[in-house]
Image (cartoon, helix red, strand yellow):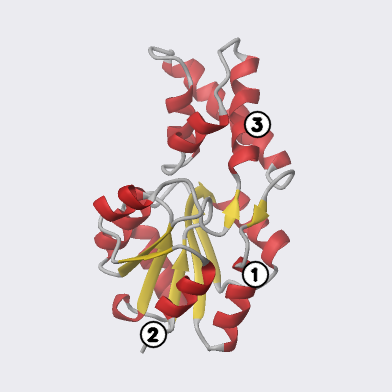
Amino acid sequence: MKDTVIFDLDGTLLDTLKDLTLGVNHALRLHGMPERTIDEIRGFIGNGVPTLVKRSVPENTPQDVLGQCIEDMRTYYSAHSTDNTKPYDGICELLEKLRKNGIKTAVVTNKLESVARDLCKEIFGDVFTCVIGDNGVDRRKPAPDNVFRALKELGSDASSAYYVGDSDVDMITAENAGIESIGVLWGFRGRETLTESGAMYIAENTDELFSIITKS
């Protein structure tokens, strides 16, 4: 049995969709741009806030305006990231079961690192050994850099770990890091996307996820 699990955050541990949508639309309104639906935002999530906002603004938006929209989104979201955000069903129980089984856990996300750490601290307490996000230095997913950071902090290696996520970005990240991937179906993408992007395992619920993680 592997002894390490690294999780994506948005769409995997936390349902952040409504707060992300509100943050993007706040920035768009400030600049007189059309707002996006929650389903549109769902499809744009996965590569971090700069890419999320870039996908949300109208085509041919000037770079300086795009930059301001990104900052406006970050400012709003930093103040409102927990307004509607909550763990998916069964996540807290899953994390407790993993802890009792001696399995080390961490988070690697494309969310701004300070925001990710605050979110995890407020919602999950000290469950995770480390929470790693966009620090403005290391490359974001699907580059493997932050997964390697997490493995080092955990004292683990790739052969002893799973990476768990809900998107094609997550599955490609796991492949780039040389670790086994588990796709979950309760997040922002579906089975077809996960399968096509190389998911080694797929879990429909947290009980299935626990079974995959703890298999001999």
Kind of element beneath mark 2: loop
Q: Amino acid at mark 3?
A: Leu
Kind of element beneath mark 1: helix
Q: How far across and down, in percent of the image, does residue 111 sit?
A: 52, 47
Q: How far across and down, in percent of the image, does residue 137 sit?
A: 42, 49
Residue visible at 28% across and 66% down in the picture: 200
Q: How far across and down, in percent of the image, does residue 119 sit?
A: 66, 55
Answer few, some or many: residues within 10 Å of disc 3's Cα (few below 14, many 20 plus, some between 14 and 19). Answer: many
Report which residue position mark 2 lands on. 215
Report which residue position mark 1 lands on. 92
Which label sits in the foreground, 2 or 3? 2
Q: Amino acid at mark 2?
A: Lys
Q: Amino acid at mark 1?
A: Cys
Q: How far across and down, in percent of the image, does residue 194 sit?
A: 33, 53
| Residue situated in front as seen by the camera: 33 or 139 | 33
Report which residue position mark 3 lands on. 22
Q: Marks 2/1: CA distance?
A: 20 Å
The answer to whether residue 31 of the structure is visible from this angle is yes
